[in-house]
Image: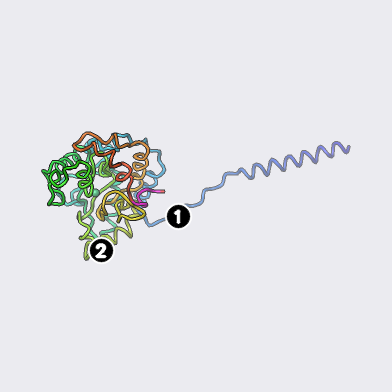
């Protein structure tokens, strides 16, 4: 009889154990997401860019070796959002975020205008080589081959404001220049108001400024560019991919490309961006 009782007690205890085990494994409802002020369409775009496993960008994509006019992920920027000086293309995700930012800026009385967007390898090569050969003057005054006969010095002089073909963030469709290519413009009056609006609000829409003032946080790379903004959710993935895949030896196919390894162009210029644009 005692044995039977003991068995019953044991069975009861086991049952209780199974109950506790089941209870602990019950499906817990996920916490409710906080609503934000970002419009739903933009929030969806950012969430998708953050969470979807996007197929790794190829070396050719990183180096701008494709035509944005025929690439399925790209779209034309509508003329009313540009300086109407050319046809501009952006990635569709970056464009959706830009449109949301543009609308919010307009409500605050700030007009944002795309003055440059995607430039592929061939376009960058023609800019670079025109400067390399002296056909186009550096900062409107220096004929590069005369002022800088040494190839490395010449490349560094061009790199003050122009990327080597294959290394530009403008290849990626995530980056754009806004309003004026001139830091002085953004230092006073209307330009200052525009820059202050961007620094305060652009991160809400997924944008970061890659070329901030040089200093401890950004010791190398291009000079400060207050007009250049990156769509960070995608640009960060491209920056990570560049860190993994891109070497100076693969920066080739244009006049002066032999200077890329001695300068360390990938480390200093491609990866030499602000902390905000590097991501976590
Ligand atoms: Zn730019």
Q: Nearer the viewer, mark 2 or mark 1?
A: 2
Q: Is mark 1 within 8 Å of ligand 1?
A: no
**Residue 277 in magenta?**
yes
In terms of secondary structure, where does tag 1 sit?
loop
Which is more toward the observer, 91 or 128?
128
Number of other residues with Cα within 10 Å of mark 1, as a class: few under 14, some 14 to 19, many 20 or more = few
In terms of secondary structure, where does tag 2 sit?
helix
Do callouts 2 and 1 mark residues in contact (Cβ within 8 Å)? no
Which is more toward the observer, 149 or 124?
149
- Percent position (x, y) of residue 184? 21, 60
Q: Residue at x 26, y 52 (%)?
A: 223
The quarter of the image holding the N terminus is top right
In this figure, which residue is indicated by the disc labeled 2? Answer: 193
- Magenta residues span 274-279
Examine the rendered structure and indicate whether residue 38 appears above or below residue 127.
below
Q: Is mark 2 within 8 Å of ligand 1?
A: no
Number of other residues with Cα within 10 Å of mark 2, as a class: few under 14, some 14 to 19, many 20 or more = some
**Residue found at the far left of this picture:** 135
**Residue 142 in magenta?**
no
- Percent position (x, y) of residue 252? 24, 34
In this figure, which residue is indicated by the disc labeled 1? Answer: 34
């Amino acid at each position: 009889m005692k044995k039977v009782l003991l068995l019953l007690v044991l069975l009861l205890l086991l049952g209780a154990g199974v109950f506790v085990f089941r209870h602990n494994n019950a499906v817990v409802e996920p916490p409710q997401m906080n609503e934000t002020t970002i419009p739903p369409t933009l929030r969806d775009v950012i969430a998708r860019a953050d969470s979807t496993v996007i197929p790794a960008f190829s070396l050719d994509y990183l180096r701008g070796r494709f035509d944005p006019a025929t690439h399925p992920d790209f779209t034309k920027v509508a003329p009313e959002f540009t300086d109407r000086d050319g046809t501009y293309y952006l990635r569709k995700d970056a464009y959706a975020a830009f449109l949301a930012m543009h609308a919010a800026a307009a409500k605050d009385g700030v007009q944002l205008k795309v003055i440059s967007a995607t430039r592929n390898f061939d376009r960058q090569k023609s800019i670079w080589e025109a400067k390399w050969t002296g056909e186009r003057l550096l900062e409107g005054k220096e004929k590069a081959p005369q002022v800088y006969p040494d190839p490395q010095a010449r490349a560094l002089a061009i790199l003050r404001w122009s990327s080597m073909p294959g290394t530009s963030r403008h290849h990626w469709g995530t980056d754009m220049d806004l309003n004026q290519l001139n830091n002085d413009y953004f230092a006073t009056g209307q330009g200052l108001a525009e820059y202050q609006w961007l620094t305060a609000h652009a991160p809400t829409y997924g944008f970061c400024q890659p070329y901030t003032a040089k200093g401890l946080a950004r010791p190398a790379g291009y000079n400060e560019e207050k007009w250049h903004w990156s769509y960070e959710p995608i640009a960060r993935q491209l920056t990570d991919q560049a860190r993994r895949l891109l070497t100076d030896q693969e920066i080739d196919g244009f006049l002066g490309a032999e200077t890329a390894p001695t300068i360390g162009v990938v480390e200093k210029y491609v990866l030499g961006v602000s902390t905000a644009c590097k991501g976590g």
